[in-house]
Amino acid sequence: MTDLKSKIVPTWCPGCQDFVIYASLQQAIINQKIDIKDLVIVYDIGCIGNMADFLKVFGVHSLHGRSVPTAVGIKLAHPELKVVVVGGDGGVYGEGLSHLIAAARLNIDITVLVANNQLYSLTTGQTSPTTPKGAKTKSTPKGVESVPIEPEGLIRAVNPTAWVKHVSCQKPPEVTEAIEAALKHHGFDLLDIDQLCVSFGKQLL
Ligand SMILES: Cc1ncc(C[n+]2csc(CCOP(=O)(O)OP(=O)(O)O)c2C)c(N)n1
Ligand code: SF4
Ligand SMILES: [Mg+2]
């Protein structure tokens, strides 16, 4: 696994479950014997997007909410590449939701991995589209009034053939297994990964 790590030590908070996704993704790439020259990872912005600095693979650290269209562009230009998105719930389900739906409807052959901590964490814990109703966050001190979006159902509604799954960082082997399955699948994949933000999300437990 040292081959896939960059020289930069991850800056995530101690105990952040982004470490689980980081390790699982590396393990899945190794288990699936993916040749690094055939892989591109497109990172969104946010704590999870900072993985761009910690992995030694070809990649693009894109804009907040624009990782999916960047990945779609790479895939259309180079269909032979395996293209993976690594983003957060704020970027992929918030600012980038219309791009996610468009890519899913067209069944673009990309793998979207979402670290769903139900918060905008890099900016210190504002509510995101998946924050549970009633939850108190920095931007909703009286509790979130709206219901959270449900990504799996949303994607299945626009593409019944899409590969969609939800796993939790509480069970790291399942995260690795699911990433491997997504990497093997042809067509659009969404893996929603429940991830605890230990600094701003303990009240969501
Ligand atoms: C277009 C744009 N809007 C807002 C921001 C500020 N911003 C940076 S990271 C972030 C939150 C990211 O949340 P999420 O995507 O869930 O990732 P996390 O930090 O939770 O891993 C925001 C709002 C930005 N960089 N660009
Ligand atoms: S703020 Fe939250 S999501 Fe970001 S690194 Fe710290 S624990 Fe992880
Ligand atoms: Mg988030």
Image: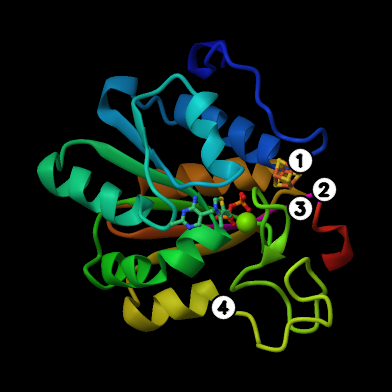
Mark on residue 199? 2
Looking at the image, is mark 1 or mark 2 nearer the viewer? Answer: 2
From mark 1 to mark 2, how far is it between C-alphas? Answer: 8 Å
Query: Label 2's element?
Result: loop
- Residue in the foreground of this view, choosing between 138 and 18: 138
Which SS does the magenta portion mostly show? loop
Does the closest atom of ligand 3 sit within 8 Å of the Cβ of label 4?
no
Task: Quickly name the residue at label 4.
Answer: 150
Does the closest atom of ligand 2 sit within 8 Å of the Cβ of label 2?
yes
From the top left corner, tell me how far across and down residue 67 is, in percent. 37, 50
**Span colored in magenta:** 192-199
- Residue in the foreground of this view, choosing between 156 and 68: 68
Q: Earlier in the sequence, mark 1 or mark 2?
A: 1
Q: Earlier in the sequence, mark 1 or mark 4?
A: 1
Mark on residue 140? none
Q: Earlier in the sequence, mark 4 or mark 3?
A: 4
Asked if the residue at tag 1 contacts the one at tag 3, i.e. Cβ–Cβ closer than 8 Å, the answer is yes
Left or right: 25 as drawn, with respect to 76: right
Mark on residue 16? 1
Asked if the residue at tag 2 contacts the one at tag 1, i.e. Cβ–Cβ closer than 8 Å, the answer is yes
